[in-house]
Image (spheres, rainbow, N blue to C red):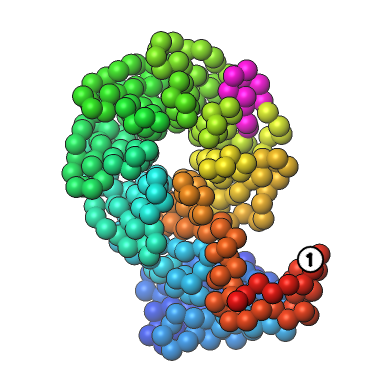
Amino acid sequence: MNRRATGSVIGVGFSRDGQVLATTSDDGSVDVWDVPSASLRETFVGHAGAAVAPIFSPDGATLYTASDDGTVIVWDVRGLRRLGRPFRFDPTAQPGAGPHRPTQSAAKAVAVSPDSKLFATSPGPNRVTLWRAGDLTALDELRGPTGAIQSLAFSHDGRLIAATGSGPDTVVWDARTRKAVKLLGPAGLGGNFGVNFSPDDRLVGTAGGDGVVRLYDVRTGRLYASLVAQGVEMDLDFSSDGVHVAAAGLAGQISIWNIRSRQVEQTISHGPLILAIRYSPNAKQIATGDLKGNVDIWDAATGRQVGPTLGGQNGSVDSVTYSPTGDQVMTTSSDGKFRLWDLTSGKLIGPPLPGADTDGWGTFSPNGKYVIATFVSGTGVIWSVDPATWRAQACRIANRNLTRAEWHSFLPDRGYRSVCP
């Protein structure tokens, strides 16, 4: 098998069809394996003592494990009843955390429609899969000469989807008809690493491997401006007021251009190589994620750093994005996890959320109710960040309110109250 359990294995159990194996360890972890491919599907952590006696339900959807800590935990093996809903987009587009053999060509790019009902992934070169977020149904596949896709974006009105990568063209599709409507290019040497729409959807911008940010007129397909930066540009974003576009990359600099004049208004020297950049919703700040695993927040007008550096990502920061309210940021890291940060305190909101064993790209949904990340392993996950959804899910699973003793055990610092109807 391709990974050893973190502790010593002390329990083993097979699903009824023999396709899935569960192992329990003395450190409390539970590993779930795909038998035919001898690959690790998922690791569950929750027991405070050694985990023993793994037993599958007859349909293989549920796993029961006991522990020396006196608890029994019921695990949702298929992942369809969790706050974090896993899915596979390469090589097949399916919900759940089941076995898969990725083709090693999956892109870590992901984009969400403005109404938060759809999202897009790429299982391989020249291909984009369109999904329905509510039930993780794959709706259609879009094709075009993008090459290996590096970045995806929805237009702000939801009518268009753009993809860019190693190919000669940035492809724009009609989200309703699923047909390619524009080929924007040619890209420079090295292709493109980022793509985004201007707030009025009049322009599409690409961040080039040749150090050039190109702005295209969406209606005509013509090049509107070529903005020359330094080094490989990894990402770009437009300010919400439509006045500026900012880009950053391997030169460790943030370049901010006035779109109308096509002139650089400001250059911010950062130092470490920058992999991701995003404007805050009010366009007053810019967040960057770098190769060293740090996120820095910058005043967009003065170029000065705002607040503390958000460190401890345990790997390079592949993506950074603001919540719709602008008071939080989400990051994905090369350690396969994504993190939510409170900008007021500069602290993590809860522990890192598990995603995969590989790096990935993530974003907030525009309605702010979930975060989504996709990974080069060909897997992805949607995590609810909506407290109302958490409460409804907990009540649905427990089918009752907590007792006062349970409440005191789990929430000792809060007064008891009923939360389930």
Place of residue 233 in the rendered image (x, y in percent of width and height, measured from the top left): 44, 26
Place of residue 52 in the rendered image (x, y in percent of width and height, measured from the top left): 63, 83
Place of residue 1 in the rendered image (x, y in percent of width and height, measured from the top left): 47, 68
Is residue 417 visible in the rendered image? The answer is yes
Total marks in image: 1
Farthest residue toward the front? 421
Q: Who's the residue at 24% across and 52% down the image?
A: 141
- Is residue 106 shown above or below 37? above
Q: Does 299 lie within the magenta span?
A: yes
Q: Main secondary structure of the magenta part?
A: loop
Place of residue 154 in the rendered image (x, y in percent of width and height, measured from the top left): 35, 41
Q: Is residue 74 left or right of residue 263?
A: right
Q: Who's the residue at 33% across and 16% down the image?
A: 225
Q: Who's the residue at 47% across and 78% down the image?
A: 21
User: Residue 98, located in which quarter of the rendered image?
Assistant: bottom left
Mark 1: few/some/many CA within 10 Å (<14, 14-19, 20+): few
Q: Does 29 lie within the magenta span?
A: no
Q: Is residue 183 left or right of residue 207?
A: left
Q: Secondary structure at mark 1?
A: loop
Q: Which is more toward the observer, 367 or 47?
A: 367
User: Residue 293, located in which quarter of the rendered image?
Assistant: top right
Type of amino acid at the residue the image marks with label 1: Arg
Is residue 233 visible in the rendered image? The answer is no
- Is residue 13 shown above or below 211? below
- Is residue 199 shown above or below 55? above
On-image quarter of the C terminus: bottom right
- Is residue 204 shown above or below 397? above
Which residues are the magenta region?
296-305
Q: Which is more toward the observer, 170 or 395?
A: 395
Q: Write down the residue under mark 1.
A: 414
